Image (cartoon, rainbow, N blue to C red):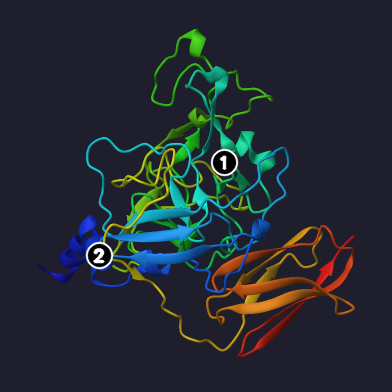
């Protein structure tokens, strides 16, 4: 076999490649989680991010509260309050493509972000007139209740994101491949919005585009995307200012090849963590960083979904075999590098700690007199954090960060 065809065979190896990578070493399915090693707390004083990552030859078990390390809330028009979910998610280390009919993504958690927060699908769980034909798009119907990080809690206190989790990573970085920001419950990774232009890693970096398109010629919601003609009793509302195009999931149609991604909102490709290739999902946003349907996954999973994570009572798994607790410490670095935007700021500022930075960064936000306003603990590289300035008056502030190796100070101006 010549080199060209050998590379193609490796690239198209599908589940075989993932099996070899995941079973032969401690792979990204183990190392990509944002572990809380200092008992840091988030909303409500609840332990944040991921508490324990343990694994055996077949699975990774991720113990988490469903509370992120970044600031969340408030939630307009949402009376629910986040609470500790005590999740233990099980992620297979040997993901494989599902043959036959694909598995539909259901309601509730369908995957987990790298900080232990739940991923929900694009639906708000309701349909027009409760008929089940025109399912409501959560971003349109519930978006008013999303906080600044584009998440909100459900009636059970489960904080979650239906769309791009903008506070989890730097979604404005168009120059580098996005990091792994979660895993689907079929075991395949979820990346941020940017990937290699071509699946073979050539062509530079680009924003991944979905292949779901608005049905722009539709005026009467009387036909489903697959062409099914509905009876009048199952019509949706006419496209108008009250129910604009995009309000419902069925307002979109999958058109193969119209974007970078397939019907699952992913593709088989090479990534930095999987140099031999893997199937990978990507979150989708537009050039203004606004979430774009279907946001995370399509209507179905690509791979085989394990039991134990989904549905009522899901996400509370118990390992049945002997496991190893992942405790590896990253190599010590000597600097703090970050980007901050916007500056000047009127309400929220965001800072992203570059991957070249040191780990476990401490710090605080200070006013012009040197008064400490907010304390930061255990900040990590490759992470995005928010600063809420809405409660502070106009003036000059300083973000000061430090590690045992170095320190960093950034001036921030709050506008009126």
Residue 281 in percent (x, y) is at: 41, 52
Residue toward you, 100 or 404: 404
Label 2: element kind: loop
Label 1: element kind: loop
Quarter location, residue 384: bottom right
Quarter location, residue 204: bottom left
Which quarter of the rendered picture does the C terminus lie within? bottom right
Residue toward you, 235 or 335: 335
User: Does the image show residue 204?
Assistant: no
User: Would you say the residues marked 1 and 2 are in contact, meaning their CB atoms lie under 8 Å apart?
Assistant: no
Residue 156 in percent (x, y) is at: 57, 41
Q: Is residue 274 above or below residue 347?
A: below
Q: Is residue 293 above or below residue 274?
A: above
On screen, residue 28 versus residue 245, left or right, reads left
Assess disc 2: are there few (<14), some (14-19) or many (≥20) residues with their C-alpha within 10 Å of its C-alpha.
some
Residue 105 in percent (x, y) is at: 40, 39
> What numbered label is drawn on residue 359?
none
Q: Residue furthest left?
A: 1
Q: Earlier in the sequence, mark 1 or mark 2?
A: 2
> What numbered label is drawn on residue 57?
2
Q: Which residue is mark 1?
A: 156
Q: Residue at x 23, y 56 (%)?
A: 15
Q: Is residue 258 above or below residue 327?
A: above
Residue toward you, 276 or 190: 190
Q: Residue at x 59, y 41 (%)?
A: 154
Assess disc 1: are there few (<14), some (14-19) or many (≥20) residues with their C-alpha within 10 Å of its C-alpha.
few
Residue 318 in percent (x, y) is at: 35, 55
How far apart are the alpha carbons under marks 1 and 2? 33 Å
Q: Residue at x 54, y 27 (%)?
A: 126
Which quarter of the rendered picture does the N terminus lie within? bottom left
User: Does the image show residue 351?
Assistant: yes
């Amino acid at each position: 076999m010549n080199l060209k065809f050998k590379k193609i065979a490796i690239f198209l190896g599908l589940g075989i490649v993932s099996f070899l990578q995941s079973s032969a070493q401690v792979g990204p399915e183990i190392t990509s989680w944002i572990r809380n090693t200092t008992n840091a707390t988030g909303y409500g004083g609840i332990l944040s991010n991921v508490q324990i990552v343990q694994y055996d030859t077949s699975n990774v078990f991720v113990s988490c509260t469903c509370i992120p390390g970044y600031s969340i809330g408030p939630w307009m028009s949402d009376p629910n309050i986040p609470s500790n979910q005590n999740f233990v998610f099980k992620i297979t280390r040997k993901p494989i493509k599902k043959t036959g009919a694909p598995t539909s993504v259901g309601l509730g958690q369908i995957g987990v972000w790298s900080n232990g927060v739940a991923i929900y699908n694009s639906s708000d769980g309701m349909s027009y007139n409760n008929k089940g034909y025109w399912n409501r798009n959560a971003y349109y119907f519930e978006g008013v209740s999303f906080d600044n990080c584009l998440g909100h809690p459900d009636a059970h206190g489960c904080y979650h994101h239906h769309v791009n989790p903008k506070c989890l990573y730097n979604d404005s970085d168009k120059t580098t491949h996005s990091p792994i920001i979660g895993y689907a419950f079929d075991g395949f990774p979820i990346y941020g919005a940017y990937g290699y232009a071509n699946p073979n890693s050539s062509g530079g970096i680009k924003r991944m585009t979905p292949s779901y398109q608005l049905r722009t010629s539709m005026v009467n919601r009387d036909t489903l995307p697959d062409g099914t003609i509905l009876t009048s009793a199952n019509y949706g509302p006419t496209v108008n200012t009250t129910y604009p195009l995009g309000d419902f999931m069925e307002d979109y149609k999958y058109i193969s090849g119209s974007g970078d991604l397939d019907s699952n909102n992913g593709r088989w490709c090479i990534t930095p963590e999987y140099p031999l290739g893997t199937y990978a999902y990507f979150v989708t946003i537009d050039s203004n960083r606004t979430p774009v349907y279907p946001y995370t996954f399509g209507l179905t999973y690509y791979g085989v979904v394990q039991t134990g994570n989904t549905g009522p009572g899901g996400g509370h798994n118990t390992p049945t075999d002997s496991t190893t607790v992942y405790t590896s410490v990253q190599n010590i670095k000597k600097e703090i590098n970050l980007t901050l935007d916007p500056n000047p700021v009127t309400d929220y500022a965001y800072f992203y700690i570059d991957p070249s930075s040191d780990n476990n960064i401490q710090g605080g936000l200070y006013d012009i007199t040197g008064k400490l306003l907010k304390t930061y603990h255990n900040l990590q590289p490759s992470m995005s954090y928010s600063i809420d300035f809405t409660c502070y008056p106009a003036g000059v502030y300083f973000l000061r960060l430090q590690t045992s190796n170095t320190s960093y100070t950034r001036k921030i101006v709050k506008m009126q």
